[in-house]
Image (tube, rainbow, N blue to C red):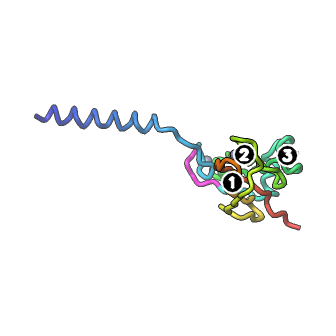
Amino acid sequence: MMLAAVLAVATAGVIGVLWKRSRSTTPDPSRCDRCGKARVLLDEESEDPHLDEGQRHEERLGTADYHVWWCGACEHGAVIRHAMTATSRRVTCEKCGHDAVDEVSQTLSPATHVQGGEFVVRISCGSCGHKQRFWRYTPRVRAS
Ligand SMILES: [Zn+2]
Ligand SMILES: [Zn+2]
C-alpha cells in the first residue's frame, strides 16, 4: 500500500528531526554559532579589545588564559576561558589525602605564541593506588 509507505517515511522523518534536536550540541568555538562559518583564533594583541577588564586582569595575573574565536563574516566572537593550574601545586590523593607521587604529564598541545599549552596529567597514589587525571594549562609564549 502506497499510503503505508508514505506514512512510514513521514514518521521516520519526524523521528529524525526530533533526534537531531535532542542531541546536545557542544558549542565548538571554532565555528560561528550565528552563521556557521569558521572562526579564527585571535592573537594576543587583537583579542584584548574583546576581553573585559576582569578578564584582562586574570590574564596578567596568570590565573586564567582567554582565547577569543572571531567570526569575520558576522563580527561575532566567542571568549573561551582556560583556568591555570599553578605548576608548583602539590597534588594530593582525593581519596586518602596522601601526597601522590607518580605523576605523568602528557602534552596535548605545546604552548605557542597564539595558544597556551594543554597537558593531561595522570597521577597514581603511592598509598592507596587511586588514579586521578586532570588537565593543566600553561600560558602562551609571550613575544619578547
Ligand atoms: Zn558568523
Ligand atoms: Zn590515595
Distance from disc 2 to disc 1, alpha carbons, whole Å, reads 9 Å
Q: In front: 132, or 81?
A: 132
Does label 3 point to a residue whose CB lies under 8 Å from ligand 1?
A: no
Instruction: Pinpoint residue 107: horizontal percent, then vertical percent.
Output: 68, 63
Instruction: Pinpoint residue 63: horizontal percent, then vertical percent.
Output: 83, 47
Residue bearing mark 3: 58
Residue type (three-letter) at the residue carrying disc 3:
Glu
At numbered mark 1, what does the secondary structure look like: helix, strand or loop? Answer: strand
Does label 2 point to a residue whose CB lies under 8 Å from ligand 2?
A: yes
Q: Residue at x 45, y 35 (%)?
A: 21
Q: How many neighbours does mark 3 have within 10 angstroms: few (below 14), some (14-19), or many (20 or more)?
A: some
Residue type (three-letter) at the residue carrying disc 2:
Cys
Quadrant housing residue 106: bottom right
Q: Which residues are magenta?
A: 34-39
Quadrant housing residue 110: bottom right
Residue type (three-letter) at the residue carrying disc 1:
Ile
- Marks 1 and 3, the one that precedes in the sequence: 3
Residue bearing mark 2: 93
- Look at the numbered discs 2 and 1 and tell me whether their residues touch, using CB distance below 8 Å: yes
Residue bearing mark 1: 123
Q: In front: 86, or 41?
A: 86
Instruction: Pinpoint residue 73: horizontal percent, then vertical percent.
Output: 63, 51
Q: Residue at x 79, y 56 (%)?
A: 46
Q: Is residue 73 visible?
A: yes
Left/right of residue 27 with respect to residue 105 in the rendered view: left
